[in-house]
Image: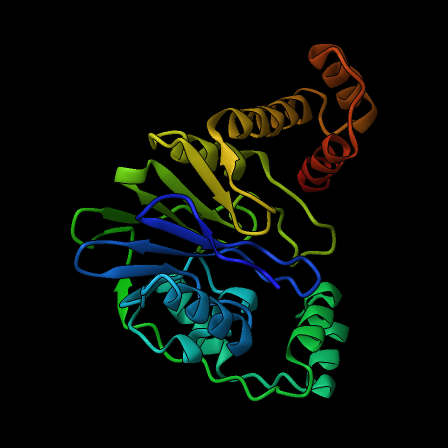
Amino acid sequence: MQTLQKLSDRLFYLPAYQKTDRPILAAIAGDNQTLLIDAGNSSSHAQLFKEQLASYHITGDVLALTHWHWDHVFGLREMDMPTIANSMTYDQVKELQKLSWEDKELDERVEAGIEIPFCADAIKLELGSQREIIIPDPVLIFEKRMQVNLGGVTCTVEHAGGDHSPDSNLIYIQEEKALFLGDCLYANMYAEKWHYTIEKMSKLLEKIESYDAEVFFLSHHPAPLTKDEFARFATLLKTSAELTKKHKGDQGAIVKEMSSRFRRELTEDDFEIIGYFVNGYA
């Protein structure tokens, strides 16, 4: 079972769980209100989070979504509080509300290329036979950016986009110097080949680096990244993008120059990132 982690008196998070694709959930406790970040991938995921927060005498008042994907919104009914979303996320949630999550319909959407096997398998594993998913409408809708004053702590929710999901938000906790990235730095999985694009990644990293953050949360990483750890990850992304453009998607040439530049053998993670940029090169 996942165990709630306390980073400060203001900041708590429930780690990700890879087996059923549970993302990080977080709580930002102000003097007056508490903001929750993402709703989880099921009622049981949301309930686990709420129960563990209760052990610290914390209850959520408002919830912000990082983006619309199932694993971040299926717990909304259980969370039972006003939800913040940008207009793109709102529109996608309205589409999700129309769908059935039974095996037959899931398998049909996979066959049609609408859903991906990875997500369909995780949904079946996480939900079991409990497939009646009710996703309430987000009620606090913004276009580009909004701030939430919780009392003694201020949260900024800003649309950032990216390859993974065009509606992705960043959520910045100013007093904690903490930045929640959701899934925005992951690849586009709803494509024939999982990929990054150079232009979108460059714009996204520029926006992320405009924030004065010391700790970075990526929703499916096992733990938050320090400033140095994130800088190394960002360097890998930037270098991969730069060399993909320079070598016009020639993976062999990219690998050779990156290995020389980094003065080491490339890792499995390095090859994966390079592969995503090569897949997205046009």
Between 180 and 234, the one nearer to me in the picture: 180
Q: Quadrant of residue 116?
A: bottom right
Q: x, y (%) of residue 184?
A: 51, 47
Q: Quadrant of the N terminus?
A: bottom right
Residue at image location 74% in from the left, 51% down from the top? 193
50 to the left or right of 57: right
Q: Is residue 114 above or below residue 199?
A: below
Q: x, y (%) of residue 128?
A: 69, 82
Q: Quadrant of residue 16?
A: bottom right
Q: Residue furthest right?
A: 252
168 to the left or right of 260: left
How many marks on residues? Answer: 0
Residue 85 visible somewhere in the drawing: no
145 to the left or right of 116: left
Please, which colouring scheme is shown? rainbow
Q: x, y (%) of residue 73?
A: 48, 70
Between 46 and 244, the one nearer to me in the picture: 46
Q: Quadrant of the C terminus?
A: top right
Q: Is residue 235 above or below residue 117?
A: above
Residue 52 visible somewhere in the drawing: yes
Between 134 and 39, the one nearer to me in the picture: 39
Residue at image location 48% in from the left, 71% down from the top? 46
Q: x, y (%) of residue 145?
A: 27, 50
Q: Residue furthest front?
A: 55
Residue at image location 42% in from the left, 80% down from the top? 77
Q: Is residue 238 above or below residue 257?
A: below
Q: Quadrant of residue 268?
A: top right
